[in-house]
Amino acid sequence: LYLKRVELHGFKSFADRIEIEFGPGINAIVGPNGSGKSNITDAIRWVLGEQSVRNLRGSKLEDVIFAGSNTKKPMGMAEVSITLDNSDKLLPLDYSEVCFTRRVFRSGESEFFLNKTPCRLKDIQEILMDTGIGKDGYSIIGQGQVDEILTGRSEERRAILEETAGIMKHKARKKEAEKRMEETVGNMVRIDDILAEIQ
Ligand code: ATP
C-alpha cells in the first residue's frame, strides 16, 4: 500500500488542477520557502478527514480554498484526490487502486467520494482505521510531532501504540455497541411505561 498520486484543484496555493505522482519507496518534494510543499501534506490530511482548521494552518474553513493572487481570481471550490496503490489488498476493498476525494465549496458544503462514488467521511475513516493512514494515524508526522510523542503523557503514548497495533477499530466498535445498548435500555423503559399505562 503506498501513495501513488495526489491531485489538487483550488486547494490553498494550487489554483490550477495539478497531479503529483509518487512511486514506492522514498519520494521527496523540494522547493523554495512558501512554494507550497506543506500545502501538499495539508491536502493529504484534509482528504483523510482533518476537520480542525488549525491543524491545516488556517483560521477558518474556507482558508483551504484558493484565495486569489495578482493574476488569478479566487476559486469557489477546493478539491483534493489521493490515490493509493492497493495491489497488496491491505485496504479491505476489491480494487487495486483506491481514490479518496474531498470537495468543499465556499458555502461550507462538503462532499466525499470513494473511487468517484459519493460516500460519507465515516466510510473513508472506517476503511483506513488501523492502517495507520487516517488523519490521526502516524503516517504523517508534522514538524514538532516527534517531540510531542517523546514528551507526551503515558496515556497519549498508549493511544499511539494502540493505533499502530490495530485495536482502535475494536475500541470504536465497542463504543458504538455501548451507545446502541444505552438506547435499547431507554426504549425498554419507555415500553414498560406504556405497558403500565395500558394494563
Ligand atoms: P516552507 O519551506 O517555508 O515551509 P512551503 O513550501 O511548505 O514553505 P507552504 O507553507 O506550503 O510552503 O505554502 C505557503 C504559501 O501558500 C503561502 O505563500 C500562502 O500565501 C499560500 N496559501 C496558503 N493558503 C492559500 C489560499 N487559500 N489561497 C492562496 N494561497 C494560499
Image: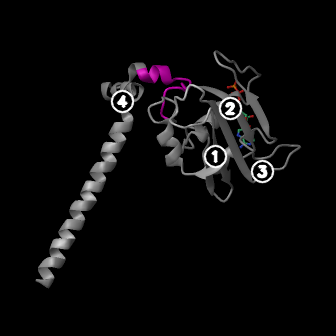
Q: Which residue is found at the position 65% from the left and 36% from the top?
A: 82
Expressed as whole percent of the image width and height from the top left, the position of residue 140 reads: 55, 27
Indicate the colouring scheme. one colour
Sequence-wise, the earlier of marks 1 and 3 is: 3
Residue type at numbered disc 3: Met
Specify whether tag 3 is near ligand 1 (CB below 8 Å): no
Q: Is residue 90 above or below residue 8?
A: above
Q: Which residue is mark 2?
A: 40
Residue type at numbered disc 2: Ile
- Mark 3: which secondary structure? loop
Expressed as whole percent of the image width and height from the top left, the position of residue 112 reads: 61, 49
Q: Is residue 99 above or below residue 176?
A: above
Residue type at numbered disc 4: Ala
Q: Nearer the viewer, mark 4 or mark 3?
A: 4
Q: Which residue is mark 1?
A: 102
Residue type at numbered disc 1: Arg
How many other residues sit within 10 Å of disc 1, few (<14), some (14-19) or many (≥20)? many
Sequence-wise, the earlier of marks 1 and 4 is: 1
Q: What separation in Å lies between label 2 and label 3 (alpha carbons)?
A: 18 Å
